[in-house]
Amino acid sequence: MDFMDIDPANLEIVVYPDPILKQTAKPVQAFDKTLQAVAVRMIELMYDADGIGLAAPQVGLPWRLFVTRPPEDDPNAQTQGAGCVYVNPTMQITTRDMDVHEEGCLSLPGIRVDIRRPIEVTLQAMEVDGQPVSLSRDDFMARVWQHEIDHLNGVLIIDKMNPMDRIARRKDIKELERDAQR
């Protein structure tokens, strides 16, 4: 998708089974006003949906970009509209310690699943202006980063469900699929 074809004001959260959610996102090449406007719109959508993170594929863009609310220990954390933008992120797992926590997804409304993830990661990315950033977390934000990077790789929480969760959520998943056909 060409940057020229994008009207950030028209971006909306896409819902499973939209095919873009299963695609691997492509690196962002241009750090320009369109990228900045898309990031601002994604932050608005994330807050409007009461989310804590949102990846570009979730708004129909095949870009390696995600936004999050600021971590709670960030002084901007309580500022409505404040958000963190990560462009072309890569992540390293820095521990073998794992934790299970319930996760939801704005593209899978009504579905919540226990997901096992490493508790500590380091994230390298670019900010929306192209400046590099490297951050490490060993708290809930590490989980959020992993969830959003999964989106950039075409992986959803339903892909990580254990067999019992898959059976328990089968009806909800089928309902989303039926809704998409209408």
Image: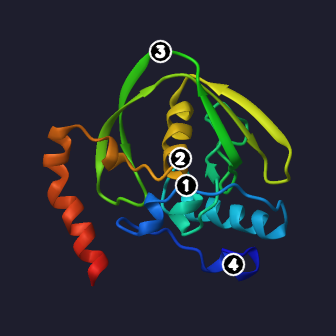
| Residue for point 46% across, 69% down | 14
Q: Amino acid at mark 1?
A: Leu
Q: CA distance from mark 2 to mark 1?
A: 7 Å
Decide if residue 177 is on the left or right side of residue 21.
left
| Residue for point 57% across, 65% down | 45
Q: CA distance from mark 3 to mark 4?
A: 41 Å
Q: CA distance from mark 4 to mark 2?
A: 22 Å
Callout 2–callout 1 Cβ contact below 8 Å: yes
Structure colour scheme: rainbow
Image quadrant where one finds the N terminus = bottom right
* The disc label shown at residue 148, or none: 2
Q: Amino acid at mark 4?
A: Ile
Q: Which element type, helix, strand or loop, lies under badge 3?
A: loop
Q: Amino acid at mark 3?
A: Arg
Q: Which element type, helix, strand or loop, lies under badge 1?
A: strand
| Residue 52 at x, y percent in the picture | 53, 48
Sequence-wise, the earlier of marks 4 and 1 is 4
Decide if residue 159 is on the left or right side of residue 39.
left
| Residue 4 at x, y percent in the picture | 76, 80
Q: Which element type, helix, strand or loop, lies under badge 4?
A: loop
Foreground residue among 82 and 174: 174
| Residue for point 78% across, 59% down | 29
| Residue 43 at x, y percent in the picture | 63, 59
Callout 3–callout 1 Cβ contact below 8 Å: no
| Front disc: 3 or 1 | 3
| Residue 174 at x, y percent in the picture | 19, 65
Question: Would you place residue 129 above or below residue 142 in this image?
Answer: below
User: What residue did someone put label 1 on?
Assistant: 54
User: What residue did someone put label 3 on?
Assistant: 96
Foreground residue among 100 and 92: 92
Q: CA distance from mark 3 to mark 1?
A: 26 Å
Sequence-wise, the earlier of marks 2 and 1 is 1
